[in-house]
Image (tube, rainbow, N blue to C red):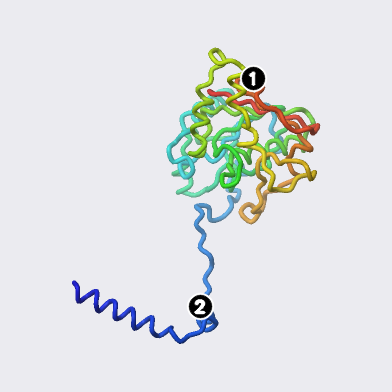
Amino acid sequence: MRYFFILLFLSINSFCHQFRDLSKEEIYLNQIIADTPNYSISQTPLKPKNPKNTLPKTLDGNPLIVVHASSFFDENFQAKEGIDKIVSEYAKNSEKIIYLIHEQSPLGYELFYPKYRSPDYEIFSAGGEHNLPIAGKKATVVGGFFGSYDGARGCHALALRDAIRMHFELSQEPLELNVPLEAVYFYEEDLPLIKKIKELDPQKNTKEEIKKTFENFAELFFLVDNFETSSPDALGFAHPFTDLSLNPSYKPGRPVDTAGYSFEIYFENILVSSFGKGPKKTSIKIRRKI
């Protein structure tokens, strides 16, 4: 075995010796330029294969948007039980169910974990982006990842952002977005805070204690300052979808920010945060359970 490694070293040394006298420019000219490999599970945007892949004209009532309910993202199935529960309720009540799918393929569907497989709409979404026409006054958003900040731009946050934007393209009525934490999954670094929030109980905790837990919540999860806004002093709500090559059918629209919109965040119907000064009013209602 020792002689084998000696021979291997001599062979490598001889091979490297051939390049010692080559200039950097000569080495560059002899390179083979290859395409950058695509490491994404999604090779091509979802093309309409059936009517469920086509956007509805309007979504009234309180539609359910299920964002990337897949073990490709949610490896520990944090949100599966909650998603199955809320989807079942929506199906029983004949309310609209929309799945945002990141990959329509045998592998994509194998990793896609909801028990219910008959949504009203099944729309391709690379990162939570969508153009769903939210015409009603309410919508519920589940799935994940929750939150939007540098290094962790969650699909759930982008889905919230686009629900807000699309609603106000169709209506000037205030919008209510419901977020049941039981059916949402989170980045690992956010789990300690989310656990603390889930343990809050308005029957046991005072309003002051609850508000203290939500201190800086909007800054932590929703407000961003590194994307285009409609006013120089405005902050954006969540991150926009910028790589349109991943979803050419997506239309990004105008910024959602604190200049054009005003926001209120509630936890179990207790107001815990408010920000923004625009005329387009949105309330985000966070609750522990479905």
> In this view of the protein, can residue 124 be seen by the observer?
no
Q: Quadrant of residue 60?
A: top right
Classify 10 Å Cα crowding around label 1: few (below 14), some (14-19), many (20 and above): some
Residue 89 lies, with reference to residue 107, above or below; the image says above
Q: x, y (%) of residue 131?
A: 68, 42
Three-letter code for the amino acid on which mark 2 is drawn: Gln
Three-letter code for the amino acid on which mark 1 is drawn: Ile
* Closer to the camera in the image, 265 or 109: 265
**Residue at horizontal 60%, vertical 51%?**
47
**Residue at horizontal 49%, vertical 28%?**
195
Q: Secondary structure at mark 2?
A: loop
Q: Quadrant of the C terminus?
A: top right
**Disc 1 target residue:** 270
Frontmost of labels 1 and 2 is 1
**Disc 2 target residue:** 31
> In this view of the protein, can residue 47 be seen by the observer?
yes
Residue that protrudes farthest toward the top in the picture: 203
Q: Quadrant of residue 255?
A: top right
Residue that protrudes farthest toward the bottom in the picture: 21
Query: In whole angstroms, how far apart are the C-alphas of marks 1 and 2?
Result: 62 Å
Classify 10 Å Cα crowding around label 2: few (below 14), some (14-19), many (20 and above): few
Q: Secondary structure at mark 1?
A: strand
Using residue 156 as the reference point, say whether residue 278 is left or right of it. Answer: right
* Closer to the camera in the image, 23 or 153: 23
**Residue at horizontal 78%, vertical 42%?**
233
* Closer to the camera in the image, 143 or 282: 282
Of pointers 1 and 2, the one earlier in the residue sequence: 2
Q: x, y (%) of residue 73?
A: 49, 43
Q: How many marks?
A: 2
